[in-house]
Amino acid sequence: MNKYNFSSNIVHDPEPRKNMNKVSRTITGIITITLGIYITYASFLDLAKDWPGLIFGIVFIIIGFFILFNKKEDDIEKIKDTKLKN
């Protein structure tokens, strides 16, 4: 007997997780792109000394776009949802 009375037959609704995945991906992508733009802009102000900042800024922008437009993660979530239903 489970002394905490947790039910092992919990029914998961895949829809809130799907929407939360899009929201969290959008927020993370926008923050990463904004940080990359800021680092790139700040490094352009003093390019002679801060060329590594330019490289890191461009890398952050690329990673941010990858996070923002990654649709493969949605396909993985669909596969997980169909497995939970079965």
Image (cartoon, rainbow, N blue to C red):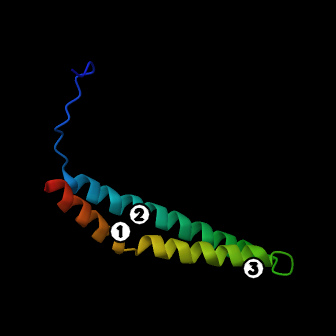
**Nearer mark to the viewer, of 1 and 2:** 1
Q: Label 3 near label 1: C-beta < 8 Å?
A: no
Q: Residues within 10 Å of mark 3 (few under 14, many from 20)?
A: some
For marks 1 and 2, give the CA distance: 10 Å
- List x then y, in percent, for residue 53: 74, 73
Q: In front: 66, or 3?
A: 3
Q: Residues within 10 Å of mark 1 (few under 14, many from 20)?
A: some
Q: In front: 41, or 23?
A: 23
Q: Helix, strand or loop at disc 1?
A: helix
- List x then y, in percent, for residue 8: 20, 35
Disc on res. 73: 1
Please tell me which residue is depicted at 81% across the width and 75% down the height of the picture.
Answer: 50
Q: Helix, strand or loop at disc 2?
A: helix
Q: Which residue type carries mark 1?
A: Glu
Left or right for 86, reference 68: left
Left or right for 62, reference 54: left
Q: Quadrant of residue 42?
A: bottom right
Q: In front: 79, or 63?
A: 79
Q: Quadrant of the C terminus?
A: bottom left
Check disc 2 and report the residue beneath it: 25
For marks 3 and 2, give the CA distance: 28 Å
Sequence-wise, the earlier of marks 3 and 2 is 2
Q: Label 2 near label 1: C-beta < 8 Å?
A: yes
Residue, far top? 3
Please tell me which residue is depicted at 28% across the width and 71% down the height of the picture.
Answer: 75
- List x then y, in percent, for residue 24: 40, 58
Q: Which residue type carries mark 2?
A: Arg
Left or right for 12, reference 21: left
Q: Is residue 24 above or below residue 68?
A: above
Check disc 3 and report the residue beneath it: 44
For marks 1 and 3, give the CA distance: 34 Å
Q: Quadrant of the N terminus?
A: top left
